[in-house]
Every structure is written in C-alpha cells, then in structure tokens.
Image (cartoon, rainbow, N blue to C red):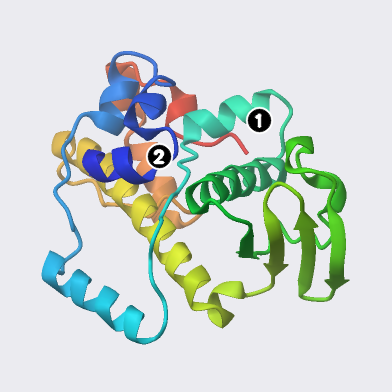
Amino acid sequence: MDALLNRLVLGGVAELQSRCPEGGSFEQCWGLGIALPAFGGTLDEGEAMLDGLQRLGVEVSHVRSVVGCAGRLNQDFARGMSKLMIDLRYFEDLLRDARAASGESLDAWCGMVGGIRKYGARFAADLGEPMVLEERKGLSAYALPEIGHVRFEVKADAKHLPVALASMFGKYVRELWMLRINEFYRKQLPALRACSGYHDSVSKRFVTETEALRLKLGIVNTCFERNR
C-alpha cells in the first residue's frame, strides 16, 4: 500500500507522514502493512483490463490522487476553509500535476465540486484569468490559461469513462486507508466490527467502541475523526 501511495499520491508518503503526530496517531495510519491488491483480483487481471481499455480507445498514461486524511482536513477547517474550498483546491492541485505531466494544454473533465455551478471567481490566481465557455444546468466550462479547458459536469463519472476510472481509483485508495485503520483497531479489539467511515450506524459504533483504546494509546482525536 505504501509503495502505491508513494508513487501515485501527490507529495508521496513522506509528505503525508510529515503531518502526523508521533506515537499512537502515527501508528493508527502507518503501523500496519497492507499487501495489494487487498480486495481480490490479480496483477494479470488488472493488466488485462488495461488492455481492454486500450481497445476502447482509452490509454491510462498518468494517475494521481490526493489524500485528505482527517488530520489534514481538520487543520484546514481550523484555518477557516470549508469542505467545498478544500475539494476545489485538491482539483486544482491535480490539474496542475496533469498539466505538468502532459506538457501540453489539457481538456479536463471533472465531476461537480460541492454542488456549485459557477467556478470562475473561485479558481486560484496562478491558473490564470478564467474565460467562461459555458455555464448552464449540469455543465460549467472554462478556459484557464495555465491549464487548458476545464469542465465540471453533473454525474460526469456516468458519462465519461476517464472520469469513472479516476473515481474508482480514488475510492480504491480510500478503501485501502479504511482497511488499515480498521485492522489496526481490530487487531487489539477482535470483536470490533469493521466500519466504512461514512455516516452510518456501524461507523458511529466504531467511534464509541474504540474511545477507551484511543485514549490509552494517545491517539489525537483530530487524527481519527473529522470535526465537520
């Protein structure tokens, strides 16, 4: 898992770990090794799927993701950033990375961020003055001098295969992260039921049932649970 993160996540493992407190909080996120692919399947099957994508005209040449762990999100919330602002910043970071990797202007398709429909005034200044190409229900498109054409579309993952692939990769990284956290706590509390980390009854029970152990191990609460 760490080898995958080091290769494909912006900043790599060293940057992610640099944010971590020492002690139990660090061990919670980095203490257990996770072998891939982790959820079934084999490398040969994955390569066959990539061959199938090429036959459909899709070539995967560059993949990157951003990890917004609870600790990182809570730090940004404390600085006055909203979840919408954080999500858009991550999009921009990935656009910069893709532009640098391609060496040419992008034609980028993105899912809608936070339900907003007008992005022109929200882009970072270093991307250049945005030109509005289209703003209508379900689609907002812009020309950014430092990036190329960027489009935000409702349900983009259902309409565009590259967006669907990006979504699947992001979810895979997230599930690996949750697997490690689940296994860290279940190693010490075997009866603990693994949780998704979303807002559901099992996840709420996980928070309650690990409270005493987290206190014992000195795990910082802001590294365990988002406060918004």
Q: Position of residue 128 (x, y in %)?
A: 79, 43
Q: Quadrant of residue 67?
A: top left
- In front: label 2 or label 1: 1
Which residue shows up at 67% across the image and 47% down it?
88
The residue sitting at 48% across, 71% down in the picture is 162
In the rendered image, which residue does mark 2 sit on? 207
The furthest residue to the front: 103
Q: Do tag 2 and tag 1 residues touch (Cβ < 8 Å)?
A: no
| Residue 42 percent location from the top left of the image | 12, 67
Q: Quadrant of the C terminus?
A: top right
Q: Secondary structure at mark 2?
A: helix
Residue 77: numbered disc: 1
Residue located farthest toward the bottom when viewing the structure as drawn: 56
Q: Residues within 10 Å of mark 2 (few under 14, many from 20)?
A: some
Q: Quadrant of residue 140?
A: bottom right
Question: Visible in this render: residue 133?
Answer: yes
95 or 111: nearer the viewer: 95
Note whether 68 is above or below 41 in the view shown: above
